[in-house]
Image (cartoon, rainbow, N blue to C red):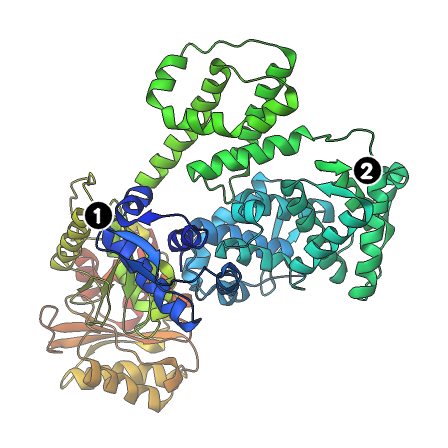
């Protein structure tokens, strides 16, 4: 399930009639994408013994059942999704990672984050800069320590505000409106906050206390109160408590009805969960309740007193939901919208009249936005006792239109074809593919880099096509390239396939690409390859009998220096016999290696230059003069070295220079000096 298929399923559960043509228009995708979503949903629904989805001859989408839909059964199905069965988008992934970090007790490593959400280390490391930037923008310190990981260093109250804001801007509208949790992403977010799994219990406790006190929250405030209390109990359980010095700030609340409400709730919680509740937590929750809106409050002289902040938040939520605006981590956008709505309400309350010279053109160009705003500002107008003028609403139209246009521009910018890279040697040598595919950056987005067996990562990545070094059985379109270092024909094959997919996906403007595939940029050599070498692992002018002899000698250089065992040398040869000469990554250059389990003691590289080149029977890159033996423990850790190898041996000028080095010592020195070659 992904966000789109979740929304389709949710609308069906709630009885909304849908049609394939309408869904295509709504989600701006091809019909085959909608049908694929429904097929995948049905596979999961069958496992849960739930009604499957049918598509009629007229394109109507409906449940294949004559009985009433059991919403609770579908709710259970949706809420049981995990990070391995719900495919997070990039924005969803970033929001979840922030949520995990905010809720963590102590340091969290990259490995732990990777395992939690089920993505590759490469994907996670790509996400972290954006996440660090978010913490900085929100005045939170995300500390990173080697061998320990990441930890959020901010006061407890600020951590809670951050968590609650994340839940607020990514809320599930169905829960507010129907009481059902039908958003898988929402459930995953709540699960990170509610490790005790008490969310539904807390709902019932608040309902019971409402009955006892005859004080009833509005729907929006009720669910806000549930989130706040659920979070507080989980934090207390982890001994992450609001400091006692806050009690002085809130001491006056002890005389309020909200303190009694809070105190009664925590008395039950204390017994039920065997917790010791400090006074600071009771006062904090009373402070939270003070800002809520109430349908009925028997202990207040202000019947139906509605807090304007909540009214604006609720109105904004409904309008944004109608437009399909997703905030994820964009707190600034959300806060700007709230500020705009506050200004509009203030003008209405004060009787200020504001003319908008663009009103007529806005109403003509965006009638749908105007209608949605008109439909959703009723509660605000009722509270103030006045109606918004067309001029005032046209300012709202202008604001929401600008947000939607921004989203449209972002969507257009991100409408590249999503590509998964697959290499039978894993992520390491796939870095060559990454480097060469930069020439197609304007039309593709690399969303996954994986080995052959890791198909789950490809599914989770949302890839639309695969570029692979070997044939694969996959429902996705696949381009099989000649080697990990792509030549001109490989890149043109990838480009042709991308054009086919773009044509299938509609008429998108694609810039003309100039493929420069001859020489990589020389100045980008970092020295990582040199760091894996040593003089005893470099040999020049070796006379090899054939490719097997050459491969063994490159392995012996590794073995004799203590990097690998004899078994690893044998495995290097067997790997080529079994899988073919794919290790010939560039004309004249081979990268023989084996699995790390075959006898790797340490990560290292050997460099063997042959006196006479030998044939590996590669269709385009024979004969081979340079062999780079690699012993790999972690593919990710040698990515920079592999990138350097590509930069060096993919550049004819550099290779000619290396050809002239008379000794192993001078050859090694020349490679080291390449860091300064311009």
In-image side of 389 versus 230 (left or right):
left
Instruction: Determine whether 159 is above or below 574 in the image.
Output: above
Question: Residue placed at 48% from the left, 9% from the top?
Answer: 355
Q: Position of residue 198 (x, y in %)?
A: 68, 61
Quickly name the residue at label 1: 505
| 499 is higher (above) or lower (below) than 629 | above
* Residue closer to the observer: 502 or 321: 321
**Marked residue nearer the N-terminal end (1 or 2):** 2
Residue 470 in the image: x percent, y percent?
A: 20, 72
Rounded to the nearest angstrom, the CA distance separating label 1 from label 2 is 58 Å
CA neighbours of label 2 inside 10 A, class few (<14), some (14 to 19), many (20+): few
Q: What residue is pinned by disc 2?
A: 298
Q: Position of residue 157 (x, y in %)?
A: 73, 46
- Residue at 22 percent across and 74 percent down: it is 583
User: Which quarter of the picture shows residue 214?
Assistant: top right
Local SS, label 2 = loop
Question: Is residue 670 visible to us here?
Answer: no
Q: For residue 667, which numbered disc appears in the image?
A: none
């Amino acid at each position: 399930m992904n966000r789109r298929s979740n929304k389709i399923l949710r609308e069906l559960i709630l009885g909304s009639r849908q049609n394939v043509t309408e869904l295509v228009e709504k989600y701006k995708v091809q019909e085959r994408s909608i049908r694929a979503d429904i097929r995948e949903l049905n596979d999961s629904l069958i496992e849960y013994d739930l009604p499957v989805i049918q598509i009629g001859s007229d394109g109507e989408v409906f449940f294949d059942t004559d009985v009433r839909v059991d919403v609770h059964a579908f709710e259970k199905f949706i809420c049981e999704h995990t990070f391995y069965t719900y495919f997070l988008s990039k924005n969803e992934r970033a929001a979840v990672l922030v949520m995990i970090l905010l809720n963590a007790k102590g340091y969290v490593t990259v490995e732990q984050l990777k395992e939690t959400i089920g993505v590759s280390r490469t994907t996670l490391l790509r996400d972290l800069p954006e996440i660090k930037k978010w913490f900085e923008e929100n005045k939170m310190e995300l500390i990173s320590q080697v061998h320990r990981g990441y930890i959020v260093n901010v006061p407890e109250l600020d951590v809670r505000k951050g968590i609650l804001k994340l839940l607020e801007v990514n809320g599930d509208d169905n829960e507010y409106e129907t009481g059902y949790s039908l958003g898988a992403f929402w459930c995953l977010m709540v699960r990170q906050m509610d490790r005790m799994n008490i969310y539904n219990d807390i709902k019932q406790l608040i309902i019971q206390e409402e009955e006892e006190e005859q004080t009833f929250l509005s729907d929006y405030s009720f669910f806000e109160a549930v989130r706040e209390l659920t979070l507080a109990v989980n934090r207390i359980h982890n001994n992450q408590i609001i400091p006692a010095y806050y009690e002085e700030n809130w001491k006056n609340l002890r005389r309020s009805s909200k303190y009694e409400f809070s105190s009664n709730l925590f008395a039950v919680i204390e017994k039920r969960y065997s917790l010791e509740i400090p006074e600071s937590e009771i006062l904090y929750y009373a402070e939270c309740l003070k800002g809520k809106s109430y349908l009925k409050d028997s202990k207040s002289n202000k019947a139906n007193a509605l807090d304007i902040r909540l009214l604006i938040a609720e109105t904004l939520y409904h309008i944004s939901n109608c437009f399909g605006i997703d905030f994820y981590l964009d707190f600034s956008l959300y806060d700007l919208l709230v500020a705009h709505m506050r200004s509009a309400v203030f003008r209405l309350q004060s009787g200020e009249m504001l003319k908008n010279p663009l009103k007529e053109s806005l109403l003509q160009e965006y009638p749908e936005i105007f209608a949605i705003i008109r439909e959703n500002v009723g509660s605000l107008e009722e509270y103030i006792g006045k109606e918004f003028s067309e001029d005032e609403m046209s300012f709202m139209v202008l604001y929401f239109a600008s947000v939607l246009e921004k989203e449209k521009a972002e969507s257009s910018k991100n409408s590249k074809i999503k590509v998964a890279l697959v290499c039978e040697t894993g992520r390491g040598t796939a870095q060559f593919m990454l480097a060469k595919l930069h020439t197609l950056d304007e039309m593709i987005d690399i969303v996954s880099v994986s080995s052959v067996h890791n198909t789950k990562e490809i599914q989770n990545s949302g890839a639309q096509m695969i570029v692979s070094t070997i044939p694969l059985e996959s429902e996705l379109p696949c381009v099989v390239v000649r080697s990990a270092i792509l030549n001109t024909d490989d890149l043109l094959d990838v480009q042709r396939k991308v054009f086919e997919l773009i044509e299938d996906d509609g008429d998108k403007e694609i810039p003309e690409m100039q493929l420069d595939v001859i020489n990589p940029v020389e100045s980008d050599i970092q020295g990582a390859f040199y760091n894996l070498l040593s003089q005893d692992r470099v040999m020049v002018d070796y006379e090899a009998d054939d490719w097997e002899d050459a491969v063994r000698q490159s392995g012996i250089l590794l073995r004799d220096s203590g990097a690998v065992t004899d078994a690893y040398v044998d495995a290097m040869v067997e790997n080529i016999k079994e899988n073919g000469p794919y290790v010939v990554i560039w004309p004249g250059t081979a990268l023989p290696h084996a699995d790390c389990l075959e006898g790797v003691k340490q990560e290292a590289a050997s460099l063997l230059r042959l006196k006479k080149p030998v044939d590996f029977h590669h269709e385009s890159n024979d004969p081979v003069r340079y062999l780079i033996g690699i012993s790999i423990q972690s593919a990710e850790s040698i990515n920079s070295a592999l990138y350097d190898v590509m930069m060096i041996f993919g550049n004819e000028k550099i290779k000619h220079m290396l050809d002239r080095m008379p000794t192993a010592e001078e050859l090694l020195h020349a490679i080291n000096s390449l860091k300064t070659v311009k």
